[in-house]
Image (cartoon, helix red, strand yellow):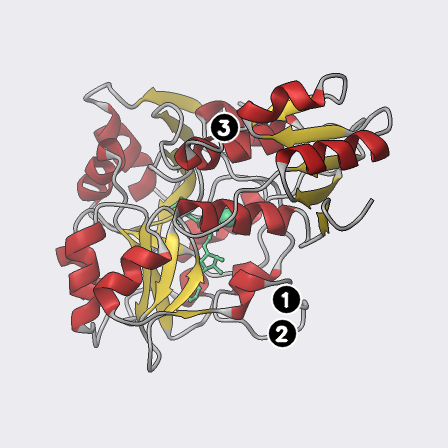
Amino acid sequence: MKTVIFPADDPRTPKKAAEIIRNGGLVAIPTETVYGLGANALDEEAVAKIFLAKGRPQDNPLIIHISCARELERYCHDIPDSAWHLAEHFWPGPLTMVLPVKDCIPKSTTSGLDTVAVRCPKTAVTRALIAQAGVPIAAPSANISGKPSTTTAAHVLHDYGTEGKIDAIIDGGPCEVGVESTIVDLTGARPRLLRPGGVTPEELSALLGELEIDKAVLGQIANDTVVRAPGMKYKHYAPRAEVYIITGTSEAAATYVRRHFTQGDAVLCFEEELPLYEGCNPTAYGKIGDVKSLSAGLFSALRDLDRPEIKTIYARCPEGGGVAYAVSNRLKKAAAFRCVNAEVEA
Ligand code: TXA
Ligand code: MG
């Protein structure tokens, strides 16, 4: 069996892909955040194939994707008003909500939790596929476990090849947001941010009135810690090189990097800074003047830099709230939270 590629703009694609999903197969789906590796969330055997293909630990639950907010009631109970408000404002879009799960969702999808993460993606072809399949689609980011997420069909092909490890890929072009969805847990006393993404903490607080930030967002979590979003404890998004985040002004950072740079290292920086790193193997992932370009370009750049000859990557990271908060969260995870302040250290 070969992996089939379906163009997103072919009107027959949703129907063809839905048939694969209903038959228990795996389809890589484009979303506005990243590509997902999708299967019928109600079919334990199909879900098992996702874990196998990705090499994903079984205790890391999957997000289920629905085609419209009304479908929430099929899979969740005790849905608070806040969930409906969030859905109204941000769906379809890059927001995932954690809610109490109904029994129709198998334990293999939720890793046995009594909650489920639900999202309604923006990408039209993917919502058409879900509607056509008539079942929710469980989909983690389509990358092989531990690697940077996939933001193009080519990234998915790179990870799985064409020899049928997955049945199909819907090619919807590059993902607009480029980092995975914001996850908010609505099952506790207060709403809690489990993962920052394209819907910002400021937008969530404005709507919810309050928002706790989970500790997994802020720092490294030990492997034996119990965390609300199990996936957050694993090493993530990481190329094989050691990544160091260099903070401080552009000039201070470049001075620091030039002093420590050795052959085989690489630099991941903002486009505006490229001239400062001539001769230091720089890759720009977007413009600091346009933070959305940084989120859209981050995983592609990390993938480009995932080469055996590169041992150390010096990375520049945006600071502050908004979408920058999500970009710095992913980059810090790739760096295992190793940061150097170039204005303090020589
Ligand atoms: O943008 C996205 O969310 C993408 C696209 C494909 O939709 N999906 C994605 O899935 O990023 P994944 O599996 O790579 O990340 C899902 C995260 C994991 O950290 C997982 O532990 C957490 O969501 N999660 C899933 N179910 C959960 C639950 N019931 N409670 C808390 N965290 C949950
Ligand atoms: Mg992932």
Give the x, y percent position of residue 67. Answer: 20, 46
Dot 3: few (<14), some (14–19), or many (≥20) neighbours within 10 Å?
many
Q: Which kind of residue does numbered mark 3 sit on?
A: Gly
Looking at the rendering, which quadrant does residue 14 occupy?
A: top left
Q: Do callouts 3 and 2 mark residues in contact (Cβ within 8 Å)?
A: no
Q: Which residue is mark 2?
A: 225
Looking at the rendering, which quadrant does residue 100 occupy?
A: bottom left
Instruction: Name the residue rendered at 73%, 38% in the picture.
Output: 240
Q: What secondary structure is marked by label 3?
A: loop
Q: Do callouts 1 and 2 mark residues in contact (Cβ within 8 Å)?
A: yes
Q: Which residue is mark 1?
A: 221
Looking at the rendering, which quadrant does residue 104 occupy?
A: bottom left
Residue at mark 1: C-beta within 8 A of ligand 1: no
In the rendered view, tell whether residue 141 sits above or below residue 206.
above
Upstream in sequence: badge 3 or badge 2: 2
Q: Which residue is mark 3?
A: 286
In the rendered view, tell whether residue 187 sits above or below residue 318.
below
Instruction: Name the residue rendered at 41%, 57% in the picture.
Output: 44
Q: What secondary structure is marked by label 2?
A: loop
- CA–CA distance between discs 3 and 1? 29 Å
